[in-house]
Structures are given as structure tokens and as C-alpha cells.
Amino acid sequence: NSSKPIHYHLLKLRAYIFDLMNTNFKGDTAGLSIALLTGDKTYLSYDTENQFRLCGLSHFLAVSGFHISLICMGLYSVLKLIRVPKGINTAVSLLVMFVYCGVADFSMSSVRAAIMLCVLLVSQLFKAKADSLNSLGIAVFILCLNPFAVTDVGAVLTVSAMLGIFVVYQPVIKNLRSNNKLPVSYTHMTLPT
């Protein structure tokens, strides 16, 4: 029905994925599949979710930038490989990315990644250079249009992680590669006997 909002259709797709996984898998296998695809952990047993938490791996069950970039850039690469024109390729990749964000219930980390990938793909379309910090700044600005975004732990963590990667990690790795050696503290390290 065309009179229903787009979010209704995204929720129907999400419910279809839940039904598909629960029909084809049983127990925690279905719950784990649903959690990995949509970020919804309600179908996982308490013991399994607690085991992930104890191992420090509960973040694997949340839809993050990895999921978004894997789907979007994977599709973009396949379409590029079969020589789909760049404009159509970008539009299809962005549409699929938007639908997947909807299936993931627009979690803050998926929205942040989607905005940053959108900036990257659109800049490539216009043959401009996309800067990582500017992309993150645009994503933070758009996320902060929702006044509750600053209280969302997922939003704060995803932005902090990306900021750490861009500001701290990349310059350190670049410096190590340019000097072609490890810092002094690592070169004299010996293994305990």
C-alpha cells in the first residue's frame, strides 16, 4: 500500500527476516543469526548473550559500521566489476545501504557509518576527495539533529572510536611506516623464559 510510510515497509522486512531465521534455524542459532543481521538480541537465550558479554564480544552482536561498509562497498565493488555506470552504482548502493540501516532499526552506529559512506560515494561521483574527519563531522552534525543522540551510548562510542582511528591511530601507523622501524620500547623487548 503506497499510503503507508516507508518505515512500515522496513519494519515488515525486518519481521520477514525474523520469521525466515526462526523458520530455518532453531534456538540460539536463529537468535544469533538475527542478532548478527539486525542487531536484535531478543531471540538469544540469556546464557548465550551472557557468554558473549563475559568474553567481551557482545559488540559483535550489534550492527555497526563494519556491517554497513561490508554490504554497501561489497555491492558497489560487484556493480563496478560488471561495469554498471558510476551514477547508477552509487544510487543502488546508497539505496541498499538505507534499507539495511532500516532493517537494523537505524542504530546510531549504522547511521553514522551510512552517512560517512554516503559522503564518500557522492564525493567519488563528483571526483572530489573525501576527508575522513569531515565525513565524521557531517555524520555527527546529522546525528545531533536528534537531541537524544548525545545520551545514546552507541552513538558516543562509535564516534569516539572513529575519532580515535582518524586522529591517533592513522598518524602513528603512518609514522611507523615512514621510519620503517618499531619504537625503541618494542625493539628491545625480550620474551620471558
Image: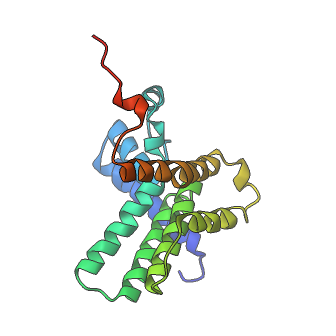
The answer to which of 126 and 186 lies nearer the viewer is: 186
Instruction: Residue at 62%, 52% (x, y): give it.
Output: 155
Residue 29 place in picture, x, y as percent? 32, 40
Would residue 186 be visible to someone looking at this image? yes
Q: Outermost residue toward the top? A: 193
Residue 131 place in picture, x, y as percent? 53, 69
Looking at the rendered structure, the number of numbered marks drawn on it comes to 0
Residue 80: image quadrant is bottom left
The answer to which of 91 and 172 lies nearer the viewer is: 172
Q: Is residue 155 left or right of residue 47?
A: right
Residue 83: image quadrant is bottom left
Residue 70 place in picture, x, y as percent? 37, 61
**Quarter of the C terminus within the rendering:** top left
Q: Outermost residue toward the left? A: 82
Instruction: Residue at 64%, 45% (x, y): give it.
Output: 153
Snapshot colouring:
rainbow
Q: In this view, does 44 lie to the left or right of 144?
A: left
Would residue 39 be visible to someone looking at this image? no
The answer to which of 113 and 61 lies nearer the viewer is: 113
Instruction: Residue at 45%, 69% (x, y): give it.
Output: 97
142 w.r.t. 183: above or below: below
Residue 86 place in picture, x, y as percent? 36, 86
